[in-house]
Image (tube, helix red, strand yellow):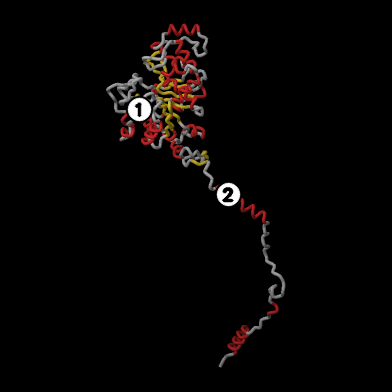
Amino acid sequence: MASSSDQSFHSSVSSLWRRPVNYSSMPRSPAATGGSLRPDIDLPPKPGPFFQVLAFGVILFLTCLQFLPATHFRDPSDRHRTWIPFDSKRSAASVTSSRTSEKEQPTISTQDEEVQRIHIFSWTDCLDLRVLAVLANSTLSNSRFPEHIYFHFFVPEGEDEKLTYYKLKVLFPHSNIEIIGQKEVKEKLKSMTHEGEFLWSSLHEIAPLIIPQIKSSLNKFIYISPNSIIKGDIGELYDVDLRLYSLAAAEDCSRRLGDYVNTDVLNAIQRTASKHWVSNKPYDKNACVPDFGVLSLDARKLENDLVDAILWWTKALNLGSERSNQINPAIALAFYDKYHKLPSAWKLSASLPIMTDDETKVLHFDGPAKVCSKHAHQHQGSEYGNVWQKYLPPNSNIILSH
């Protein structure tokens, strides 16, 4: 029999489940009432066709910019993260290697100056490919930037220029080499003076002064005697400040001006001649003569009448076309007290060195060299050294033999 409390609980629960729902009091949707939807957030405005095309064009333009070559880069070792202009002719590694010390922070202009092309010219009257190969390989091996060195070799007329080029390129495939015939230089000398043939016996000494007439785009270049072995960094020689001079050469104090020219004759010429290339100061017979084996020249500072001055001195001293020595006094007098003196380490000795000095940066070719009949002044000694063999690649005799 249920108690009164149980009956009351049962009735209360039943009343909860059976409560009637008043659907008329619930909100009805606008669709049910036939009204329109009104969202809480307004829809974004639709852009016009012109702005859609413009936006698409901007996106396309920015996408195309990604395909353009890089113009600047940053050196990872640079704390300042400076943007450096990118040059396709040099690699970022060469710029990175120039930052060898945190104390040295070269500017952009200094870096560009370090990686400029270094043009090296050499003139040979008796073509010996072994000599040229040793010169090229020794220069490249001791340079910090061998990829920036450009060789220009003048070879005698009648030589096969293409064959010479290909043989050297087989040995040094990554080098920059140009073979030029001497005929072009002779024609240029004829155009500069009607007596150019009078200087043909000294053409190997005058050639460095005519190069700017052939390569007018070059401002600075280096001339090296072909019978040379370079032990120093040729970039140091290229970076030498010539100041007000057009030429830089080492002094050869083993030869004096008085050994080649009579000072009494020079004094007489000085008193009577009115040429501007005659020195106002008395000529010193004990003055060291310049060594023309290694030269650094600035074409912009060379005098236009330099060849005329050499020709005038040749006639005034009655030197003639044949000389028993390798020094042209006319050229030495044309540059008397008018050239920048290089360190003695860049002096090329006329004889084979008995002992190799660690500070010596240029040596005479100490191997057997080809001798032409009309150039008997070339070295013909029977004793040879072994420095040249270090810079001659293996199997080169087979490639370079004529």
Residue shown at the point (50%, 14%) measured from the top left: 277
Position of 201 with respect to 56 (left or right) is: left
Mark identifier at residue 62: 2
Residue, disc 1: 128
Q: Position of residue 218 (x, y in %)?
A: 49, 28
Q: At which x and y percent is residue 118? A: 45, 30
Q: Earlier in the sequence, mark 1 or mark 2?
A: 2
Determine if residue 60 is in view.
yes
The N terminus: image quadrant: bottom right
Q: Is residue 346 left or right of residue 308?
A: left
Neighbours of disc 2 within 10 Å: few (<14), some (14-19), many (20+): few
The percent position of residue 219, horizontal first and vertical second, equals 50, 27
Q: Quadrant of residue 323?
A: top left
State how far apart marks 1 and 2 are (Cα). Answer: 58 Å
Q: Select label 1 or label 2 by which is in front.
A: 1
| Kind of residue sitting beneath label 2 | Leu
Reply above or below: 95 against 200. Answer: below
Contact between marks 1 and 2 (CB within 8 A): the answer is no
User: In this view of the protein, which residue sits in the foreground, 88 or 76?
Assistant: 88
In the drawing, what numbered circle is on residue 303? none
Q: Please give the name of the residue rendered at 52% of the width and 40% of the height, measured from the top-left corner.
A: 83
Quarter in which the C terminus is drawn = top left
What amino acid is labelled 1 in the image?
A: Asp
Residue 120 lies, in percent from the top left, at 43, 28
Q: Secondary structure at mark 2?
A: helix
